[in-house]
Amino acid sequence: MHIGSPAWIHALWLVPAIVLTWVYAEGARARALRRFADPELASALMPQRSLALAVVKLALVCVGVLGLVVALMQPQWNEREIPVTRRGREVVFVVDVSRSMLAEDLAPNRLERAKLWIRDVTSVLEGDSVGLVAFAGAAVVKCPLTRDIGFFEMTLEELSPASAPRGGTMIGDAIRKALSQVFERSPEDMPEDGQFRDLILITDGEDQGSLPVAAAEAAAASGVRIIAIGLGSDTQGAPVPDPEHPGQFLTYQGQEVRSRLDSDTLAEIARATPGGVFLNVGTGNVDLDDVYRELIQSAEQTTLETSSVVQYEQMFWVFLAVALGALMLDSLIEDQGKWSS
């Protein structure tokens, strides 16, 4: 037998408390009668009671209270293990946090807009595991694959240029980091054949020699599809704010640094994976939650986790029925009559 709410076991003390209270009350009643009149006069003036029936009523009340308490404890029988299979996809967001993502050609800036879009996705997630990698000159795993959306959103909110240890933009390193440290299983470990993993790359695409296309080809070999989202102007570009000097922009050799979207590189990265997609957002907008529904949620799924859940047959109703029956029977019995021993 399994007890669903064991805390109610302390309420069993009500039963001896009721018995002791009854014994005390009967004794007090007898003493009061003796003080009021002699036994013959009290017997003539007061209704007579049957001690046996009074004890029966006490027993019924105790049974009723005991049954109610046991019912509240939720007794359960017939333990069974029910297999539970969770199906979905593994989705890893790889987000550029380099200084160029502070450019304000998207309001309030590229990075904050990317975080806003990702939060839109978490509001519609259904069964998928999500992870997060931040990168600039080096890549860092900020959140392993998880279904804990609260934790994922907390790590997402903390993203900033300080999230990566070095400046620069090394897209290839970020893809390789996701493949080696975030995606949990190799294709051979998947219970079904197919492509059940997505890497959503959000960046302005200004790579600095990290061989991103080769990394994308490695992703394809691992059964990972890349959805590349390009942010920023690809014509004039946008100046990059200097985080150490608010209101000023970064300069190099006296020239203002401008960040431009490298759409060609991102398109090539997406093409390197089967089913890969490049979304050239530029300085516009994208409903990433719609992208998730159309490209990820509707795609084929795999078994992400197999576990078992223990179930029991609820039996509280038996004790509840006994309790109600005892209390109803108690209400029908009158203890009027002669005292008997």
Image (tube, rainbow, N blue to C red):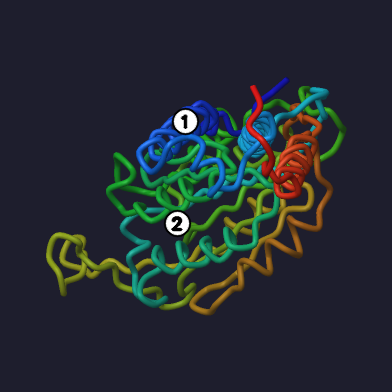
Q: Residue at x 16, y 66 (%)?
A: 254
Kindly give the residue lying farthest to the left in the view shown.
245
Asked if residue 98 is positioned above or below residue 185 in the image, the reply reads: below
The spot of residue 12 in percent (x, y) is 54, 29
Q: Kindly indicate whether the residue at mark 2 contacts the one at mark 1 (C-beta within 8 angstroms).
A: no
Q: Residue at x 81, y 53 (%)?
A: 299
The spot of residue 196 in percent (x, y) is 76, 42
Whether residue 68 is visible here, answered yes or no, is yes
| Helix, strand or loop status at disc 1 | helix
> Which tag is nearer the camera, tag 1 or tag 2?
1
> Alpha carbon of mark 1 to alpha carbon of mark 2: how far?
78 Å
Asked if residue 333 is positioned above or below residue 34 in the image, the reply reads: below
Q: Name which residue type carries label 1.
A: Ala
The spot of residue 234 in percent (x, y) is 49, 72
Q: Disc 1 designates what residue?
A: 17
Quadrant of residue 185 in the image?
A: top right
Given residues 203 and 82, the one toward you in this image is 82
The C terminus sits in image quarter: top right
Given residues 293 and 31, the one toward you in this image is 31
| Helix, strand or loop status at disc 2 | loop
Q: Name which residue type carries label 2.
A: Glu
